[in-house]
């Protein structure tokens, strides 16, 4: 198109509502003003709009024929969610419903233990980063397929949690204070060994929630083939804060 | 990032354009339906209602068989449940769902290619349409053929755009820059438009 007319790119971005995004609001305003005065550009825009609208219609139409009614899949999802929710209700204390009586006793014991321990808690320093001697990070044998299948973190058994707290000399076992976290997340092939676990504080700037974001980011990059799995495992275990800064291009957590 | 598990799901609003080409009716409903959900499970089911078809279409555009695509969608929403249950970020969940689906689609394809390279290849050849002579069908097939001839990344961008995702969301799903998305979509839509111009000039 001639330079005094809108380019196809401008028209497409305008059609998509993307021309004025960010700092380009003035550009959108100018383009709309030009359109009002220019029959040629209006005509070109109508052509592009027609093509785009028809393409989207054809695209969806060609695939909609393969869609089945949602009732069955919806029911299946509900059933699976109920199963997941049931396991959540009993939570990390016990995975097997058959041991509910024993587990109830365990809850009572733990509650008593927590009350006792709360009174004797002591400071343990900044645990945003694990102690390398205790938690160097450990992986299991996985392929990239295994990793990208959507493995979820298993909840850490109570006995192991207590062992981790004991190793780090922490008496304050309140669940709101720390997450016993995997240094190398299972989503990146991390193992469930105690050498891959540490009590990560929720209250620190570089806390468990921030690390979760990094885990998601690295998982996505690995599955997109943009970061090698071994590299992701190495970076998160050696310096997860440094890895966060690197992959989010920031010095501070978002 | 800390987030409140009890907060209602917040999804980006995608405005309808003059083309009416974005599935605005599906997307406009997204902000309201999930808000009424009383439990996490209900929230996930509400999102399933809204986004199952767009996700299925996106998976089918990878030429994944419909039953496999349906299984992947189940897996995507179970992952969403786990994601929310763990109190993870609720920002742009629509983009998050497409991203998970995209990764699973790639994995499914790799698996299919390993198991039977010939069968995976054969899936790309669509059966001839018996009514191919009809003019609108010809146009439809021509436009869809243009899309099939695009590089894979451009096809993904276009499919996601056809499902109503904004450019920044597409960039997030595919892990590319916003500029790369804009370039890709401009290039693809220009090709489609040129293919249509040929039709118009032949018709005259």
Image (tube, coloured by chain):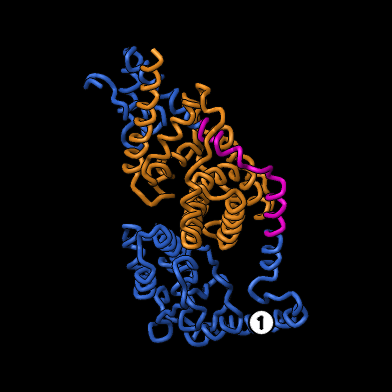
State which chain is coloured orange: B
For residue B122, side relative to residue A239 (left or right)? right
Q: Nearer the viewer, residue A70 or A202?
A: A70
Where's residue B184, x and y in %?
34, 39
- Left or right: residue A77 compared with residue A208: right
In this picture, residue A248 sits left or right of residue A74: left
Residue on which the image places disc 1: A110
Residue drawn 56% across the image and 27% down it:
B131
- Residue B140, compared with residue B149, is above or below; it is above
**Host chain of mark 1:** A
Q: Which is the main secondary structure of the residues drawn in magenta?
A: helix
Counting from the top left corner in percent of width and height, residue B199 is at 40, 21
Q: Nearer the viewer, residue B3 or A7?
A: A7
Name the spot of residue A197 as percent of width and height, x first: 48, 79
Q: Position of residue A215 (x, y in %)?
A: 44, 64
As displayed, is residue A139 above or below residue B135? below
Which region shows up in magenta? A57-80
Q: Where B1 sits versus A97, above or below?
A: above
Q: Residue at x 42, y 40 (%)?
A: B148
Q: Examine the structure image and report whether residue B128 is included in the region drawn in magenta.
A: no
Residue A78 falls inside the magenta stretch: yes
The chain assigned the colour blue in the figure is: A
Question: Which secondary structure lies at badge 1?
Answer: helix
Can residue A213 be seen here? The reply is: no
- Residue B189 seen in the figure: yes
């Amino acid at each position: 198109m001639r330079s005094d007319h809108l380019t196809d790119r401008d028209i497409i971005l305008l059609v998509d509502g993307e021309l004025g995004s960010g700092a380009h609001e003035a550009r959108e305003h100018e383009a709309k003003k030009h359109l009002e005065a220019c029959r040629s550009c209006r005509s070109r825009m109508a052509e592009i709009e027609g093509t785009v609208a028809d393409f989207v219609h054809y695209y969806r139409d060609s695939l909609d024929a393969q869609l089945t009614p949602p009732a069955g899949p919806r029911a299946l999802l509900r059933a699976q969610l109920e199963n997941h929710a049931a396991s959540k209700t009993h939570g990390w204390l016990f995975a097997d419903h058959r041991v509910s009586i024993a587990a109830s006793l365990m809850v009572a014991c733990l509650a008593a233990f927590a009350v006792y321990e709360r009174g004797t808690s002591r400071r343990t320093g900044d645990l945003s980063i694990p102690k390398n001697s205790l938690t160097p990070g450990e992986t299991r044998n996985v392929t990239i397929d295994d990793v990208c299948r959507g493995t979820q973190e298993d909840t850490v058994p109570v006995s192991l949690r207590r062992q981790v707290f004991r190793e780090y000399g922490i008496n304050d076992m309140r669940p709101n204070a720390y997450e016993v976290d995997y240094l190398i997340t299972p989503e990146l092939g991390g193992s469930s060994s105690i050498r891959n676990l540490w009590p990560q504080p929720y209250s620190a700037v570089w806390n468990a929630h921030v690390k979760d974001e990094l885990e998601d980011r690295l998982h996505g990059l690995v599955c997109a083939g943009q970061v090698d799995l071994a590299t992701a495992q190495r970076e998160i275990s050696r310096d997860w804060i440094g890895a966060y800064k690197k992959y989010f291009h920031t010095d501070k957590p978002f | 990032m800390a987030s409140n598990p009890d907060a209602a799901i917040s999804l980006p609003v995608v405005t309808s354009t003059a083309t009416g080409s974005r599935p605005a009716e599906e997307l406009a409903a997204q902000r309201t339906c999930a808000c009424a959900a009383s439990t996490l499970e209900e929230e996930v089911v509400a999102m399933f209602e809204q986004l199952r078809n767009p996700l299925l279409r996106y998976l089918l555009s990878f030429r994944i068989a419909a039953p496999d695509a349906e299984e992947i969608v189940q897996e995507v929403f179970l992952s969403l449940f786990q994601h929310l249950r763990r109190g993870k970020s609720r920002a742009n969940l629509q983009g998050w769902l497409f991203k998970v689906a995209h990764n699973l689609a790639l994995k499914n394809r790799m698996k299919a290619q390993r198991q039977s390279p010939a069968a995976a290849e054969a899936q790309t050849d669509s059966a001839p349409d018996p009514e191919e002579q009809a003019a609108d069908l010809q146009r439809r097939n021509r436009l869809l053929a243009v899309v099939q001839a695009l590089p894979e990344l451009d096809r993904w961008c276009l499919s996601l755009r056809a499902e109503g995702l904004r450019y920044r969301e597409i960039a997030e799903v595919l892990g590319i820059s916003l500029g790369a998305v804009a370039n890709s979509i401009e290039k693809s839509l220009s090709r489609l438009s040129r293919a249509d111009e040929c039709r118009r000039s032949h018709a005259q």
